[in-house]
Amino acid sequence: MKKNILCVLVFLVMLLPFSFACLSTAIPGDIDNIPPAGSTSISSSSNEDKVLKEIPDEADVEILPDFPLAVTDDIGRKVVISSLPKRIVSLAPSNTEILFALGLGDSVIGVTDYCDYPDAAKAKTRVASYLNPDLERLVSLQPDLILAESIQEKTVLPALERLGMTVFVTEALTIDTILNDISVLGKITGKTVAASRMLDTMNLKINSVVSKTQNLSSSQQLKVLYVNWHDPIWTMGRDTYINDIIRKAGGTNIYESDFEKSRAVSLESVITKNPQVIFVSGMGTTGDVVYKGIKDEVRLYTVDAMLNNRIYKISDANLIERPGPRIVDGLIEVSTMIHPEIFGEPK
């Protein structure tokens, strides 16, 4: 009998470390909530989760910059942001998309007639067509930051500067430029965390394409023509994010070495350059018009793209025409057009 009692005591002593270990996992000050033995409750775990949720992740803590803050915009202007912007006017649909994606929808007080994404942008005050803002209406909104685009540099920008407005100008020459704009805008608006998360997502998509195309041989990099109007044919040359998209998607822009930016080109030059892939876009429903215009052009029947039925239309022109967060989805779609053997057939 004494032997049995001794064994039980030894067993209880051995259990003590495990008992204290279990107690040590309880949340301080909440020991009373430890469930009784045999209980199916896991309240200690749920309470622990609750405490963890109440403690913000270090990555979620927004650290505001010291104002005034000096930044350089895409056309080389030094822009001084005097305080955290709370009333923002966007003069380009791409900039509007960036602002909303950063969670700044409530701070956007004015947009262009073409700012239609996301849906919430449609409810904002219209202050401009694409090129000509209503300066009187714009000034009446008393914005503390205006986001313009380089196409407005010679027309709108001088007037805004004369009025003493704070204007940041974007110019998307490459996808990296777009990523940098998102980073800078996140910084000056106090949204660096949102910007960082957005950039992480975008870079994942970019890398998913580039990792499969970066080692293609020159013969595998198909000759590509991008068309955003058909009569005459308008396309993009170097120093454009379209050119960058074509390169990252594993193609070669047939006009990369011919000119910068956008230009009309002749049918004869297209035939001579003989693109292997043609993809088109167009604002609104004009994409269908452009696509049909190219498909019906009998003089193009000798080029490889036509002979091999490699003419495509972007599913949503805004994926390719707006240099904002959705540009990476445009890249993925273009990559399927150029290399369906790698990325699958385009939709």
Image (cartoon, rainbow, N blue to C red):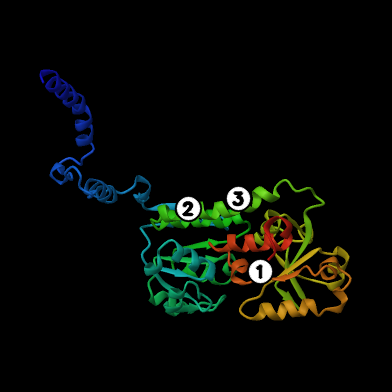
Percent position of residue 320, x then y: 62, 66
The answer to which image quadrant residue 317 occupies is bottom right
- Residue located 51% across and 54% down the image: 201
Residue 103 location, quadrant:
bottom left
The residue positioned 17% from the left and 40% from the top of the image is: 28
Q: Earlier in the sequence, mark 2 or mark 3?
A: 2
Evaluate whether residue 125 shows in this view: no
- The answer to which quarter of the image holds residue 264 is bottom right
> Which element carries disc 1, helix, strand or loop?
loop
Name the residue carrying label 3.
207
Q: Please tell me whether mark 2 or mark 3 is closer to you in this view.
A: 3
Q: Residue furthest left?
A: 2
- Between label 2 and label 1, give the one nearer the viewer: 1
Q: Earlier in the sequence, mark 2 or mark 1?
A: 2
Residue 76 in the image, given as x and y percentages of width and height: 56, 55
Q: With 345 as the anchor, is 137 left or right in this view?
A: left
Mark pair 2, 3: CA separation: 28 Å
Q: Which mark is drawn over residue 347?
A: 1
CA separation in Å, label 1 and label 3: 21 Å
- Circle 2: is it few (<14), some (14-19), or many (20+) Cα within 10 Å? some
The earlier-in-sequence mark between 1 and 3 is 3
Q: Position of residue 67 (x, y in %)?
A: 36, 52
Mark 3 crowdedness (10 Å alpha carbons): few <14, some 14-19, many ≥20: few
Closer to the eye: label 1 or 3: 1
Up-down: is 15 above or below 308? above
Residue where numbered disc 2 is placed: 71
- Neighbour tally class for label 1: few under 14, some 14-19, many 20 plus, Cα within 10 Å: few
- Residue 289 in sight: yes
